[in-house]
Image: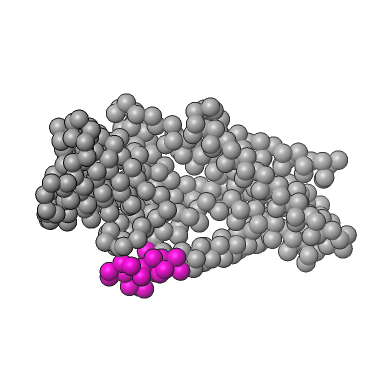
């Protein structure tokens, strides 16, 4: 396949890059605004939660959320770039000069591949580290709030020399063994309720929980307050850290180490393997999105039907995204191996995009 000239390559690449960056920037700003408003609503019950701190916290949280919409930014950005080139008849001129669709799509495909590699090698590690930092700040800020800081609570059950215990926490600092807003229901070995322990923070050490700012409510004694309190446990820190840490909170370059440590501890590392394979497949998924966008964006404006064509591209991209999520769930449940679950949508999407273009352009 012949390459087009460097000048035209740079021009088309710039058009793709500007449109994709514009779509992603718009979505990023929208996510940031909504998250900032939500944090300001929650900050009403927390001490020291200023608007500046909430703005910084939202900025730390937004990249990991925006990362999930990168495929759609690629799809809509590529469609916008191709439609804009078609509207200004630049694609007509390119075709008249003997440039085929495969040639003027090369810059877009290279941009998609480059963005995919950048997002895996640099953006993902940075967003994961920012998410971890945001989780730590959030746990510290909302640890003394009168309302839960999130919709999901952490529940653990343990047996130790102190008896049975049920531990509930409202905040878990990802990639650590630290909990915030902790309540422990302690039972005697015979199953009778003994006492309730409330703490602002709990950190799992080797063989015990280190509780901070503790209040103990017992059935046969007055309430007691302690700055620090140790609760025996048999829980393994590696196991607890895995249950607290979602795979998307682990940087790409750390996934192999996490997988090795998890398997060495005798735990299931399927989720982390799936995350690593999905990140490796991301550049090809972005290429598939550009091919899908091209399949629905090369019709000339004077022929009409642009709205229907755009709607078809959106539907096709959504179907590909749903297929990616379905395969992700199948891979996480162990029904499909992680490499198959990660690479299947990208490979099939690319092949279908090429097939559609071959049918449109070459009959």
Residue depicted at x 81% and y 52%: 98
| Applied colour scheme | one colour
Q: Which residue appears farthest toward the front when viewing the image?
A: 220
Which image quadrant for residue 346? top right
Residue depicted at x 43% and y 45%: 248
In the displayed structure image, the side of residue 192 where residue 356 appears, left or right: right
Magenta range = 36-57
Seen from the viewer's position, the closer of residues 359 and 335 is 335
- Quarter occupied by the C terminus: top right
Q: Is residue 51 magenta?
A: yes
Residue depicted at x 65% and y 43%: 320
The correct choice, above or below, for 7 with respect to 360 in the image is below
Question: Residue 149 placed where, x, y %?
Answer: 36, 58
Seen from the viewer's position, the closer of residues 361 and 228 is 228
The correct choice, above or below, for 307 with respect to 317 in the image is below
Q: In this orientation, does residue 346 appear?
A: no
Question: Residue 29 placed where, x, y %?
Answer: 52, 66
Which image quadrant for residue 241? top left
In the displayed structure image, the side of residue 283 where residue 304 appears, left or right: right
Secondary structure character of the magenta stretch overall: helix
Q: Does the magenta stretch include residue 151?
A: no
Seen from the viewer's position, the closer of residues 309 and 245 is 245
- Quarter occupied by the N terminus: top right
In the displayed structure image, the side of residue 251 where residue 294 appears, left or right: right
Count of numbered circles on the image: 0
Question: Residue 227 placed where, x, y %?
Answer: 12, 55
The correct choice, above or below, for 190 with respect to 221 in the image is above
């Amino acid at each position: 396949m012949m390459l087009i000239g460097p000048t035209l390559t740079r021009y088309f690449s710039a058009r793709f890059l500007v449109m994709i960056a514009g779509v992603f920037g718009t979505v990023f700003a929208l996510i940031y605004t909504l998250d900032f408003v939500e944090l300001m609503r929650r900050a009403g019950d927390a001490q020291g939660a200023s608007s500046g701190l909430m703005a910084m916290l939202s900025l730390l949280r937004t990249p990991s959320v925006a990362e999930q919409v990168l495929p759609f930014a690629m799809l809509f950005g590529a469609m916008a770039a191709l439609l804009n080139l078609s509207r200004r008849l630049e694609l007509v001129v390119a075709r008249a000069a003997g440039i085929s669709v495969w040639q003027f799509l090369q810059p877009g495909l290279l941009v998609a591949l480059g963005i995919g590699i950048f997002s895996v090698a640099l953006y993902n590690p940075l967003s994961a580290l920012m998410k971890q930092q945001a989780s730590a700040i959030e746990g510290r800020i909302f640890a003394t709030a009168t309302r839960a800081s999130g919709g999901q609570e952490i529940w653990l059950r343990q047996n130790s020399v102190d008896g049975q215990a049920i531990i509930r926490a409202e905040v878990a600092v990802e990639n650590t063994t630290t909990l915030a807003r902790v309540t422990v229901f302690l039972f005697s070995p015979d199953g009778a309720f003994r006492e309730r322990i409330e703490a602002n923070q709990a950190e799992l050490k080797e063989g015990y929980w280190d509780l901070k700012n503790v209040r103990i409510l017992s059935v046969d004694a007055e309430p007691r307050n302690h700055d620090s309190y140790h609760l025996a446990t048999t829980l393994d820190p590696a196991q607890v850290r895995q249950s607290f840490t979602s795979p998307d909170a682990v940087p790409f370059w750390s996934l192999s180490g996490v997988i090795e440590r998890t398997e060495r501890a005798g735990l299931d590392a399927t989720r982390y393997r799936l995350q690593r394979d999905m990140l490796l497949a991301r550049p090809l998924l972005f290429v598939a999105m550009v091919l899908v966008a091209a399949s629905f964006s090369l019709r000339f404006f004077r022929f009409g039907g642009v709205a229907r064509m755009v709607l078809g591209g959106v539907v096709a991209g959504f179907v590909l995204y749903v297929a990616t999520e379905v395969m992700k769930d199948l891979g996480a449940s162990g029904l499909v191996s992680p490499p198959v679950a990660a690479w299947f949508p990208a490979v099939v999407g690319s092949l279908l995009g090429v097939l559609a273009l071959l049918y449109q352009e070459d009959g």
